[in-house]
Image: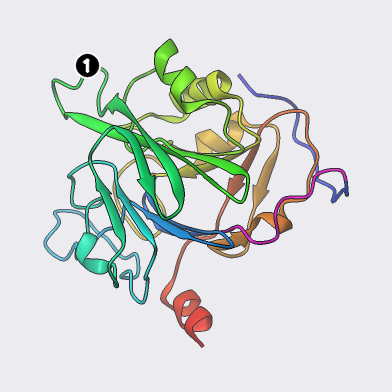
Amino acid sequence: MRWGSPARLQATSSIRWPETVKITWFGQSAFEIAGSEATVFLDPFGSMAHAPVRWDYPPIEGVEPDVLLVSHEHPDHNGVGAIEGNPHLVRSLAGTFKTPAGPIVGVAGEHDDVAGTSRGHVVMFVLELDGVRLAHLSDLGQPALRPEQVEAIGKPVVLFVPVGGGPTLGAIEAEAVCRQLDPTWVVPMHYRSPLIDFLEPIDETLSLFGEVEMLKSPAFEMSELRREAEEPVLVVPDIPRVSDRRAESG
């Protein structure tokens, strides 16, 4: 079921996000979220050279956040060695944590649809930077959130949600979870891109949202998303490539 009919998004002045929040997708479920006073990195991957799948996302390099969040102990999510500096680390733990980026809430969830008995647990992280509430759903595999999880997550402005199926939510389940949380913006993750050869592609997810914004870069600032829509907007960052990293470092 679609949220609505496709529409061309027009810039407006009625919604203005903080100029200081920047989001960068590094591939899979790895994101850097930079605010005016702190930077948070979620679910980094390390070397995947020995993985039994094709993995051509560029390595994570030159990243030195204030806070590092690891949602669960799978190699495409727990590559803490790729992160530089000495960040405050919250690793695979649910709870409420005091961090340099302010309070961060970890909400317990399951990596499968059988109460975690197959693939274990994940932690869904909720944080606020510069007044923007963001929620990262990790490798959620539950077909729906329980009421207490919905309450703990709240209503995010930005929701990062897996859409690639397999061990996580597929397109239909992800859309249903988005309805539960009613975010302003939805950023899909953990799906088959041209750089990996597993999971499902994003095509079905694109068909389920009436408002879609395809970006030209894996990095974007909230100030670029000055859009007005009556339903959540699917914001799709471009695929990260080595040239993007070189451009940013230069």
Q: Nearer the viewer, residue 18 or 158?
A: 18
- When asked about the image quadrant of residue 119, the answer is top left
Q: Is residue 144 at all visible to an observer of this figure?
A: no
Is residue 169 placed above or below 243 in the rendered structure? Answer: above
Q: Nearer the viewer, residue 110 or 195?
A: 110
Left or right of 97, for residue 92: left
At x 45%, y 65%, the residue is 240
At x 87%, y 48%, the residue is 12
Left or right of 107, for residue 189: right
Q: How many marks can you see?
A: 1
| Residue at the extreme bottom | 250
Which residues are the magenta region?
14-22
User: Where residue 73 sits in the image (x, y, percent)?
Assistant: 17, 44
Is residue 181 placed above or below 195 in the rendered structure? Answer: above
Is residue 5 placed above or below 91 in the rendered structure? Answer: above
User: Where residue 36 sits in the image (x, y, percent)?
Assistant: 59, 62
Instruction: Identify the amino acid type marked 1.
Output: Ala
> Is residue 132 part of the magenta span, yes or no?
no
User: Where residue 155 sits in the image (x, y, percent)?
Assistant: 58, 27
Q: Nearer the viewer, residue 142 or 151?
A: 151
| Residue at the extreme right | 13
Instruction: Name the colouring of the figure.
Output: rainbow
At x 36%, y 60%, the residue is 195
Residue indicated by mark 1: 115
User: Where residue 9 sits in the image (x, y, percent)?
Assistant: 80, 45
> Is residue 16 part of the magenta span, yes or no?
yes
- When asked about the image quadrant of residue 221, the answer is bottom right
Is residue 208 placed above or below 247 in the rendered structure? Answer: above
Name the element at disc 1: loop
Give the main secondary structure of the magenta stretch.
Answer: loop
